[in-house]
Amino acid sequence: MSFESCFHCGLPVAEADRAPRFPVSYRGQTEAACCAGCKAVADTIIAAGLDGYYVSRESRPTRAEPMPDALLEQLAVYDAPEVQASFVKVEPGQEREAALLLEGISCAACIWLNERHLLSLPGVLEASINYTTHRARVRWDNTRISLSTILAAVAAIGYRAHPYDPGRQDALQQRERKAAINRLWIAGLSMMQVMMYVVPVYLAGDAISADMLRLMRWASLVLTLPVLVYSCQPFHVGAWRDLRRGRVGMDTPVVIGVWAAFIASVHATITGQGEVYFDSVSMFVFLLLGGRFLEGMARRRAGEAAESLIKLVPAFAHRIDGWPQSREAVATPVARLALGDVLLVKPGESFPADGTVLEGEGHADEALLTGEARPIAKRVDDAVIGGSVNLDAPLLIKVARLGQETRLAAIVRLLDRALAEKPQLAQLADRVAGWFVAILLLVAAAGWLFWHQHDPAHALPITIAVLVISCPCALSLATPAALTAATGNLARAGLLLTRGHALETLASASDVVFDKTGTLTEGRLQLLEILPLLGDAASAHRMAAALEGASEHPLALALRADAGTPLPLASAFRNQPGGGVSAEVDGQRYWLGKADFVASQCRAERPVQQASWRAADTVVWLVSEQAWLAGFALGDSIKPEAASLVKTMHEAGLTVHVLSGDAQGPVAAVADALGISHARAGALPEDKLAYVQALQAGGATVMMVGDGVNDAPVLAAAAVSVAVGGGAESAQAAGDLVLVGPLDTLATGLQLARKTRAVIRQNLWWALAYNAFALPLALAGWVTPWLASLGMAASSLLVVLNALRLAAPRKNTGQ
């Protein structure tokens, strides 16, 4: 037995004709590794039951060096909580989720190998890798396995995993883009040079001598070789990958067409008989690579939402140590920040983390995170979002959340999950494309047989044209290109997709069911109305605020808001749980609370409650011993954009419902104010679920919008659900979309979902119509191979450009 190359990496083996120094046992045979590193990697892969990798891989990895002990010790640093803060999400219990970047990924088999190897590790709960970005999401049980063990396991099979770094990701994309440009440049140069030899033949015909014709053919052959060997590499890799998996893909007809034309041309060049198609080969490859390069640029532009969000957080921050005694700011890497640190954020800089304002007043631009285009005022104690931009004044902030705990990181995780899922339309298009390629190959074979019998000279060019012109690239791009563009657009507007089917289902919604509190309303108590009975409303308001001065109850906070100054000086506070409060002002005692409580303290007759107060959640009265002084109606105010949203929903043909656990009065008041005829009050979680299931049983496609813990079951049951971003985490986890922007962003989402559905249908119809029209023309011999390549590239590019219309920012007009 002779061993010439390494079983793992393909490099020469020193002991080529002897027993290998580093043997690898693979499927009953002994293979040779070139070094201890490759042997360790191969043994690890085979022992894990992943030996199928060596069958399906498309390219050999680089030589695997054994991990030195020093590097293994360095990996242990990643187990420190302060190091993990920037890229690890701490979940309930001992679960962790990390964002990693994998190096060494060269094909789909690499993804398959890494995912299965990670999932085979005890304690690893989930592992998914994005083939486009090489970004991995790994979730594990920290009591069973450590992050350093996971990183070492990846290294053991010949790859490297690092904490996700946008800079490293950009470098990988730049290398891929450079390789694509080089392949395109080689194909273009070859095409121009070959055409220099072909055009004179077309023009002069028989005037060219046989020797000169033979010389030009050989020159064309030599110039076409780099195109076939180098520029066509992506098509060869793709076709080989598909064939190894027992299926035919979009690259298969391309490779067959190119090689058929080239081999026939080589035969004609050697024998001096027949036509040559070197010009068609080089032009076809150039046009196809050019189309794919433009498609790649368009897809990157459409899918840049998640990547642009990741890059919002700066690399360095200005930390103030020893505040408030010290005011000196020191540049500190964001990765080294800790909870409670005080940071100086200058105008024009991004906030490095979530936090609260300690000093200063200014405005923040949160458009990329919440969809709110207007600058947001920031004052002391206001929250700031990491990644948003400080606009006009220096602010001191206290760090509240870092790394994977920030709101920005949560948004990126949701986008990753949505983009990783394929909706039904995309899956259907992929299946149709697979069958279409198989049928296309049969049609091309039948066409060759027909023309070979009737006109052999045209059999080959017609077959090539058929293979090229009907490549189903446009069909496979029709759905994912549109969904990616729409997803990025909605993310910028403040509506995040967390499930792949969300847009598809949203476009078909017939009923929308809103929770009330925190969804249609602000979700906090506010003073709705004052009824002055003795004196003016402003004086009564200040007196009530003074009596609540010692309380932090939500009702007290609502009464103190905007009460004005100066407040009366109150003392001798007393609190009656469930009743109200009392205090002395200028030597006289006053009571504030529910009607039954204060009525027992006041000798005057109780006033009649206002009919308009049925919308109030709570009514409290201010009394002295002698008189009723004022009444205060407190409740949850309707969000200002709710009315326009409901109007848009009605105009779009949706039936709108309000479903709330609140009392009948407040629910009916909100429904009447917004023009909603279907309202249900006092609904427990199981009642909400039954309500939505009853609508679905009647044939409705229900969109549920809610924010509370009690909304999680009904959100999960609805056909499509929207969780309000500021609500409970359980509601967000159950939602198909998460609303982080204004409420009326839902109107934009509905409009864009329907436009996305229309664009997908346009793309699919165009792809099918194009093939139905082009295929008969090619079979009839009316389309040359170079024209076929131009048509195929133009068809795919048109689909992507049509999808890019969905990436343009949209403004909700309320129509």
Image (tube, rainbow, N blue to C red):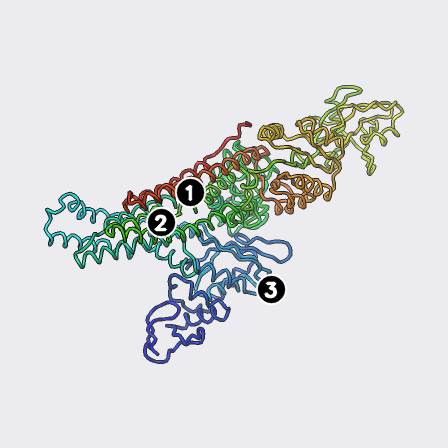
Can you tell which of label 1 and label 2 is closer to the viewer? 1
Residue 259 image offset from top left, x and y in percent? 29, 56
Out of 44 and 788, give the one closest to the viewer: 788
- The residue indicated by pointer 1 is 768
Decide which of tag 3 and tag 2 comes sooner along the chain: 3
Q: CA distance from mark 3 to mark 1?
A: 52 Å
Residue 324 image offset from top left, x and y in percent? 58, 43
Q: Amino acid at mark 1?
A: Leu
- The residue indicated by pointer 2 is 177
Question: Residue shown at 11%/48% (left/top)?
Answer: 208
Out of 274 and 759, give the one closest to the viewer: 274
Decide which of tag 1 and tag 2 comes sooner along the chain: 2
Q: CA distance from mark 1 to mark 2?
A: 30 Å
Q: Amino acid at mark 3?
A: Arg
Q: Amino acid at mark 2?
A: Arg
- The residue indicated by pointer 3 is 144
The residue tagged with tag 3: helix, strand or loop? loop
Residue at the outermost bottom position:
18
Q: Quadrant of the C terminus?
A: top right
